[in-house]
Image: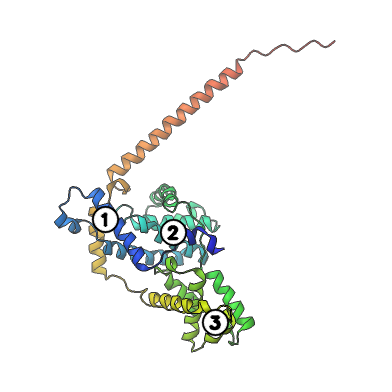
Amino acid sequence: MFPSSTQCKNWMFSCEEELNTLRDRTNLKHIQTYGRHVNDATKYEFFLTSEEEKIMVKRYELHLRDFCKRFQPPMPRCVVGTSFHYFKRFYIHNSVMNYHPKEIMVTCIYLACKVEEFNVSIQQFVANIKGDRDKATDIILNNELLLMEQMNFNLSIHNPFRPVEGLLIDIKTRGSLHDPERLRPGTEHFLERASLTDAILLYSPSQVALAAVLHAASKLQENLDSYVTDTLFGEDGKGKLEHLIESVRGIRSMVKMADSTADRNQQKILDKKLEKCRNAENNPDSEIYKKRMQAMLDEDDDLYHAISAQNYSRDNSALNMSIPASPEVA
């Protein structure tokens, strides 16, 4: 149940201002940690601003959507929805200057495949990635534990797809709308756009689902007001109706803004800026990162050899044990 889930308890926020405050704090913390050598007056000429970080995240949300659409074998929508949740969660408390969105994006999708039991191997997964697939494999596997840790291992996601199915069934059985299946294309389009906003961090899956169904109905010039007020809520639920209407309006308002993205020139400028201010310790192309990875591999090799030597010594000791003679049989 959603009300008792970790999603509801730990990853739902009261308003956009709260989310923006958390993201601003993340941006400032990164600059304070890595910007001691930069003059305060020029720090935002070198580092990304909080607003620029949001633009970068938004851009890679679009890449996430497109990657999932092209993925082979075809990806279930629950995997796509869960990927968006993971990606948004990660960048509430982490800066894009510390972990590049293109690397976290594919890690989120790969982890979502596992959690939602969409069984693809890492080889099948990276076959959908252009470029160096061995490098992509290393990046995904190296970031997987980090991603889980940053979400406090809260991996279960309640998406709005199931509530939508419940609403459509209910409209068919208790509503008066002719052929409710007509609502499905508009509903799915709305949910796709909603995933590009913060609505999924602010409103429950059932609220997002209802907003999607009502939006689809309005596009067909159909009215479901009486279904919501009289059938869905009835007399006992009238006290909650005002809050629900406000939530639906808020969701629909956010979805209207889902397509606003930076122009290509701005994207190029931000890409160049990120390459300069990116934390080299987490950049797979940097010498610092490569040395750190090699040191970890060497440490693992030393541990393996130590364990092997210990096992060898124990096995030899066991083989050299004296075996007592069998007692004589009378």
Circles 1 and 3, Cβ within 8 Å, touching? The answer is no
In this view, 132 is above or below 308: below
Q: Secondary structure at mark 2?
A: helix
Give the label, 2 or 3, closer to the camera.
3
Q: Which amino acid type is marked by label 2?
A: Tyr
CA gap, disc 1 to disc 2?
22 Å
Residue 195, quarter of the rendered image: bottom left
* Quadrant in which the C terminus is drawn: top right
- Vertical order, 11 against 284 (above or below): below
Q: Quadrant of residue 229?
A: bottom right
Task: List the single residue furthest toward the bottom.
Answer: 221
- Along the horizontal axis of the image, is 101 left or right of 162? left
Residue 50 percent coordinates (x, y): 27, 61
The residue where tag 3 is placed is 228
Q: Amino acid at mark 1?
A: Leu
Asked if 217 appears above or below 9 in the picture, the reply is below
Graded by Cα atoms within 10 Å as few (under 14), some (14 to 19) or many (20 or more), the crowding at tag 3 reads: some
In this figure, which residue is indicated by the disc labeled 1?
Answer: 28
Say which element carries label 1. Answer: helix
Direction from residue 322 to residue 209 in the image, left or right: left
Q: Which residue is mark 2?
A: 86
Mark found first going from the N terminus, 1 or 2: 1
CA gap between label 1 and label 3 equals: 44 Å
Quarter of the figure with the N terminus:
bottom right
Q: Secondary structure at mark 3?
A: helix
Circle 1 crowding by C-alpha within 10 Å: few under 14, some 14–19, many from 20 = some
